[in-house]
Amino acid sequence: MKENIFKSALLAIIVLSISFSATAQVWEVPSDKKEITPAITFSMKTKTQGKDIYAKSCKSCHGDIGKANFLPLNPAPNDPGSERFSNQTDGELFFKLTEGRGGMPAFKSQLADNERWAVISYIRSFHADYKPTGGGGEIVEESSAFTGTNIKLFVNKDQVNLEITIEVQGNVDGKTVSAPGVRVGFFIERNFGLLSVCEPVTTNKNGIAKAKFPGDLPGDSLGNYNIIIKLIDDDLYGNVEYKETLSWGKAFIYENPIEGNHLWGNNTSVPLWLLISYISVVLFVLITIGWVVLQMLKLKKAGIKK
Ligand code: HEC
């Protein structure tokens, strides 16, 4: 009897979990939400913006688009480059991204409407058959990004205005030309990674990008810091980087918290009161132990005498 109850309970659990996981795969979107069309015009700009948002907020679970290297969760996040995504309307993707479900976070409070549409414009750039819906979502090809090879950075420093002008050149059909439409990041090296000085700058039609450095960034004790200038889209251009030490920072004297007379100081700078109290405590303990031992010896002697 007991066994029967146990068996049927087990069966019920199995059936329930199977049907639950089966229904979990279908994600119904209300039909009025399905019809929603993009609130922005998809362009190279929204796509680049979407790419950055994707890298920050989606990639950790959905992986690199087109590589199917998403996290093995259940239900799976899936690859946004796959047919599973391309077969859905803009409205469906927007709804799911906005509301979330289970392991998929709701982004309505984390990303503004335009930012959510920008991510979709980036995802759509992987869908070969995508037809813009409702006139809102036009996609502009990535033709404006420079496609040459052998990219080089030439750096010009304006020591007075703390401004760096870089020229990007690349090779097209064996000729060296200036590279427009290349995104360049300006950073300062810190102990734990890179601090960006400004938003990435895109090179103009002459391949030029500029960045002004604030004068009040802390450097080392002489005001030096390492700057790193590099191309953001390393998937297109490889890792192109320029590094130099500049003395544009504010001198920053690092005070070692261990130095000086603190409770947590080291042996050489121990506060006097601490030393005295420590030694007196140790002496007191030693003297007490000595006294006890002495008394015990006396006892023993007294016993022998008797
Ligand atoms: C913490 C992990 C995680 C993050 C971060 C994440 N997702 Fe998801 N996403 C999931 C999971 C898991 C699912 C499947 C949910 C389900 O089917 O119940 C999913 C599903 C989706 C779907 C529906 C796919 C389908 O099969 O219909 C879309 C669209 C989507 N995610 C877009 C995004 C976008 C865009 C971002 C970034 C702004 C993002 N997700 C960030 C985990 C994540």
Image (cartoon, helix red, strand yellow):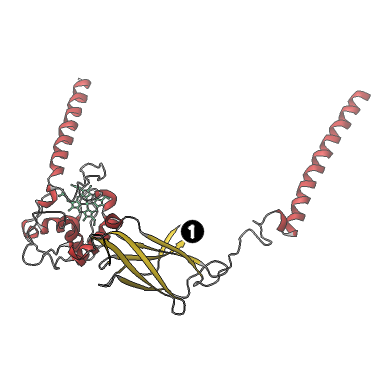
Left or right: where 66 falls relative to 150? left
Q: Nearer the viewer, residue 150 or 246?
A: 150
Left or right: where 283 falls relative to 2? right
Q: Split into 4 quadrants, where in the image is the C terminus? A: top right
Q: What residue is shown with label 1?
A: 191
From where the camera sits, is residue 199 visible? no
Q: Quadrant of residue 47?
A: bottom left
Left or right: where 153 falls relative to 274? left
Badge 1 amino acid: Asn
From where the camera sits, is residue 240 visible? yes
Query: What percent of the width, then of the height, locates residue 10?
Result: 20, 28
Q: Nearer the viewer, residue 39 or 183?
A: 183
Left or right: where 159 falls relative to 268? left
Q: Nearer the viewer, residue 20 or 138?
A: 138
Q: Quadrant of residue 72?
A: top left
Query: What percent of the width, then of the height, locates residue 157?
Result: 43, 73
The residue most toward the front is 174
Q: Nearer the viewer, residue 142 or 48?
A: 142
> What residue is at 6 percent from the left and 56 percent from the top?
31
Q: Quadrant of residue 287?
A: top right
* Label 1 secondary element: loop
> How many discs appear?
1
Check disc 1: other Cα within 10 Å, few if <14, some if 14-19, many if 20+: few
Query: What percent of the width, then of the height, locates residue 236?
Result: 27, 56
> What residue is at 12 percent from the left and 48 percent from the top?
83
Query: What percent of the width, then of the height, locates residue 1?
Result: 19, 20
